[in-house]
Image (spheres, rainbow, N blue to C red):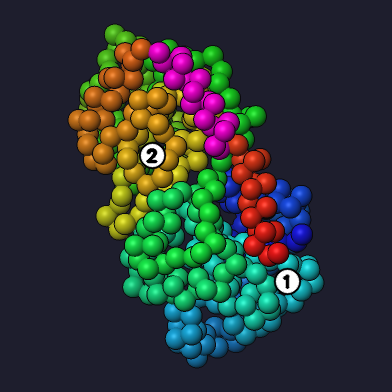
Amino acid sequence: MRIAIATGEYHLQGETFINRHIQHIFGGAAAVVCGRFHGDNPFGVPYFAWRDEEGVADQLAKLVATPINRLRFGTGRPPIGRVKRELRTFLKENRVEAILAEFGTRALAVYPLAREMGLPCFTYFRGADASKALGIFNIPGAYAKMMPNLAGVFSVSQFLLDNLARHGVRHDNAHVIPSGVDVRRFSPGEKRSGSCLMVGRLVEKKAPLITLRAFLDATGEENGAHLDVIGDGPLLADAQALVAQAGAAGRVTFHGAQPHETVRKRLATTEFFLQHSVTAKNGNTEGLPTVIQEAMACGCLTVSTRHAGIPEAIDEGETGWLVDEHDAQGFTDAIRSVFVAQGRAEMSQKARQIAEKRFDNDALLKKLERLIVESLS
């Protein structure tokens, strides 16, 4: 079947889960509806970028249409005017049979037109859209209005569905499907003794400074421990300064942002994956970090937090260690524990086995396709 993937921007290299849907869902039959097009269409799919199509007349029409849309739908996001007409034509010409909106906030923009056209619309909650976004005054109400008009809802973790429910947002046809990992590409290699890895944007919800301090306090040069940091972000300078002030430049290497293939190779040879995820001050949380699923597939032992969907992936004491958010001492103690734990090889094998069972993205994509088809039957 032909399905349209609705996303904010296309193509973004870092959105591996969305790109996989665009490339592979229903045998590669997707079209893309995006807010902005970045000039790269590696999958050769038909696409429509509505912000690129907005003209002066559309901008003026918004002055009238936006308040009306806010009353009807709880949001001013739906397209209007010429853009709406051209998007309708695009969906018809490409024989789109359903829409999958990546992120709940994107669904707010597309479901009104889908309803008008009689197209089933689904959405996929992934993190900020079911945490930070709920702190925006109109979003919970807009979500509640949207839900009866959706054919189904997917989420990368039960945590996000529960968080939506706490704000009065529910759907009877809701399913947990993690983003998953290509377990054929992400697999264990020869591990470097004492190797640790941290991957991701250096931002508040990743709490990189807690991870760095805990690593430095828990390890020393005598045990050969080394931490590689992949990623950049607003806290990079602070992180580098912390390491320099500790005189530990030889124990931590900052690699900056790297391609996904580089992350894969590094995970394959890493023993321990470290990530101290926390809820940001604005309410932003993880969903279920893809990189933790990738680390498990590579047989890494994970030290992380009881945050969002992470406990749904890590079995404490069996495939990793978890502590409460912001528990810096507990995180330090957990890193010490992982370095001296007995049976680490068996734990690594179990992490790999669980990744194969729970997070194989081929199997998860088939599950997504099956649930979409069943919802339409």
Q: Which mark is residue 91?
A: 1
Q: Which residue is mark 2?
A: 311
Which stretch is magenta?
Answer: 343-359
In the rendered image, the residue lying farthest to the top is: 222
What is the x, y in percent for residue 128?
A: 42, 56
Amino acid type, residue under disc 2 in the picture: Pro
Q: Is residue 347 left or right of residue 208?
A: right
Closer to viewer: mark 2 or mark 1? 2
Query: Which residue is depicted at the point 40% across and 61% down?
Result: 164
Q: Residues within 10 Å of mark 1 (few under 14, many from 20)?
A: many
Q: For numbered disc 1, what is the local secondary structure?
A: helix
Q: Earlier in the sequence, mark 2 or mark 1?
A: 1
- How far is the residue under mark 2 from the one under mark 1? 40 Å
- Is residue 100 placed above or below 116 in the rendered structure? above
Amino acid type, residue under disc 1 in the picture: Leu
**Is residue 337 a member of the stretch shown in magenta?**
no
Query: Which residue is depicted at the point 51% across and 64% down?
Result: 172
